[in-house]
Image (cartoon, rainbow, N blue to C red):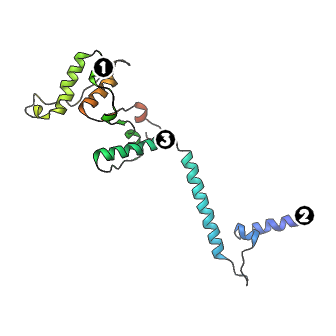
Amino acid sequence: KGVGGIGRGVGRLFSGKPAHAATTGTRIKGGQPNWIGDLIYLSATLLGSFFFLKFTLNQLDPNKAASKQAAQRKKEIKQRLGRSVQTNTYEDVIACDVINPDHLTVSFDKIGGLNVIKERLYELVILPLRRPDLFARGNLLKPVKGVLLYGPPGTGKTMLAKAIAKESNACFINVRAATLQSKWFG
């Protein structure tokens, strides 16, 4: 009797009926199947599976903290520019490295030494940004298109770049090689 009871239960499960119909029997009076009940059961199961997968994938996201920080940076940029900015995921990661000049604490006054280099940078970069009218005429007085800071680590290249951004009221983008060559973005 025990084996026969198990066999009948298994036979119900593989009878071609929905799983809950095999165990509870969803027939209405007169032998008509309950399609509405089956549809509601299937919809609830799919909806529950969807939310479970969404929650699980959200917890496994390696860029979760960075995306929150990127959303905050987008709000700051939107407020500063006065308009909305559309970006993709890669641009969101780069946006986390953009520093508003109001948040920079480094200025030329706080950098000790390097007086000759600070003077040259002021003349080459900051003065054309502050007074473009002085450099508007002639080919000889055109402002430079860029400055290359090179040298061994720890000599103040990044600090000088931050000071230039602070003095000229420009955004500072601290791009790291790991950001450019991420396994997530290529």
- Kind of residue at disc 2: Gly
As drawn, 124 above or below 155 = below
- Estimate the x, y position of residue 129 in percent, counting from the top left: 19, 33
In the rendered structure, which disc, 2 or 1, sits on the residue that comes first in sequence? 2
Q: Which mark is residue 2?
A: 2
**Residue at x 33%, y 24% (from the top left corner):** 159
For marks 3 and 1, give the one nearer the viewer. 1
Do the CB atoms of the residues marked 2 and 3 lie less than 8 Å apart? no
In the rendered structure, which disc, 3 or 1, sits on the residue that comes first in sequence? 3
> What residue does disc 1 label?
111
In the rendered structure, which disc, 2 or 3, sits on the residue that comes first in sequence? 2
**Residue at x 69%, y 69% (from the top left corner):** 18
Do the CB atoms of the residues marked 3 and 1 lie less than 8 Å apart? no
Q: Secondary structure at mark 2?
A: helix
Which quarter of the figure is the C terminus placed in? top left
- Kind of residue at disc 3: Ala
